[in-house]
Amino acid sequence: MTEIARPFTDVFPPVAAALAEGRPVVALESTIVTHGMPFPQNARMAARVEAIIREEGAVPATIAVVDGRLKVGLSDAELEALAQAGGAMKLSRADLAFAIAEGRTGGTTVAATMIAAAAAGIGVFATGGIGGVHKGAETSFDISADLDELARTPVIVVCAGAKAILDIEKTLEVLETRGVPVVGYGTDVMPAFWSSRSPFAAPLRLDSAAAIARFQKTRAALGVTGGMLVANPVPAAAEIPEAEMAGHIQTAQREAVDRRVTGKAVTPFLLARILELTGGRSLETNIALVENNARLAARIAAALA
Ligand code: PSU
Ligand code: MN
């Protein structure tokens, strides 16, 4: 952990030991736990994802703010408690420090998790989907802080693409403008979270964890700062075809506009409605793709170590 962040940070001992010895560590976000999935599935998912990372020989570090402490790695009991915490904040770059200063508890988004991971010296992070440019952003201006964070903070983020609740094409355009490499893992097309394919090309393609590690090391050597987005398609057995999701997404979207849901409430609202509209099926897919991303992230971390 950077010296100045140390007084309010708790690095979980197994994470601290792995970092000190140069062994692979994978960061995990916690907004997916506090706002992305209901209890108890969120708790089960979080524990299973950590287990997968350990199976792959890496150490998981779930990042969160608990009672004002920035946690880099949680014990099983702390993770279970966070999964049931009422009133947790959803923390991004704007309010990560607020929660720490005010002694609050919150899940960290992709942006806030990247900040904490980089400060702790963790270079790889697994999640489900990133935030991006929302549909209708031309009037709402709703563009996730995740995209700016990817541009500035040197962490590899492994995701299953951008959700179809976002405008994938505009999300890719913003990432290109901000100089963020988007790498399709073993695919030429951008995956779309619940579906393995979107109508859009993946800007770059790599087929191994070693190649991804080499690319990031080369960027660093050239002084090219910032993160990288790895888009890992959901396993075929778990996917829901895009056409099937389109109607549900449209319904949830319309409700969000009608109810004037804005700001950071938008993504959790859409996720919860889509879960209801698919009768829980979207959640199964969500869990499968996070597990798949955790496995790849552990292999990238091993290749970087
Ligand atoms: N996408 C998901 N599940 C999630 C999120 C995104 O499939 O839980 C969360 C992530 O933490 C992401 C955040 O960083 O939502 C983006 O929120 P916003 O759009 O408000 O920036
Ligand atoms: Mn937003």
Image (tube, helix red, strand yellow):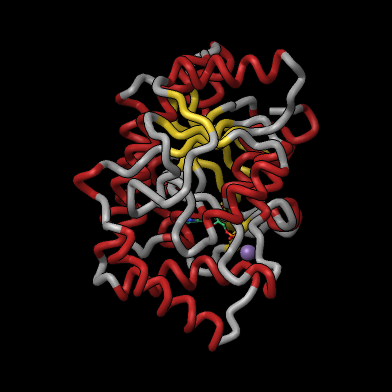
- Specify whether residue 88 is in view: yes
Q: Is residue 41 above or below residue 123?
A: below
158 relative position to 110: left or right: left
Residue at x 69% of width, y 75% of height: 139
Q: Is residue 5 above or below residue 254?
A: above
52 relative position to 67: left or right: left
Query: Percent from the top left, x then y, of residue 65?
Result: 60, 50
Residue at the extreme right: 4
Residue at x 23% of width, y 44% of height: 236
Comparing 244 with 160, the one in front is 244
Residue at x 58% of width, y 57% of height: 106
Query: Percent from the top left, x then y, of residue 30?
Result: 50, 50
Residue at the extreme left: 237
Query: Percent from the top left, x then y, of residue 305?
Result: 52, 13
Q: Quadrant of the N terminus?
A: top right
Q: Give residue 278's quadrant in the image.
A: bottom left
Comparing 278 with 70, the one in front is 278
Query: Percent from the top left, x then y, of residue 228?
Result: 59, 33
Q: Is residue 264 above or below residue 12?
A: below
Q: Is residue 76 above or below residue 30?
A: above
Residue at x 72% of width, y 57% of height: 95
Give the number of marks.
0
- Specify whether residue 73 is in view: no
Residue at the extreme bottom: 258
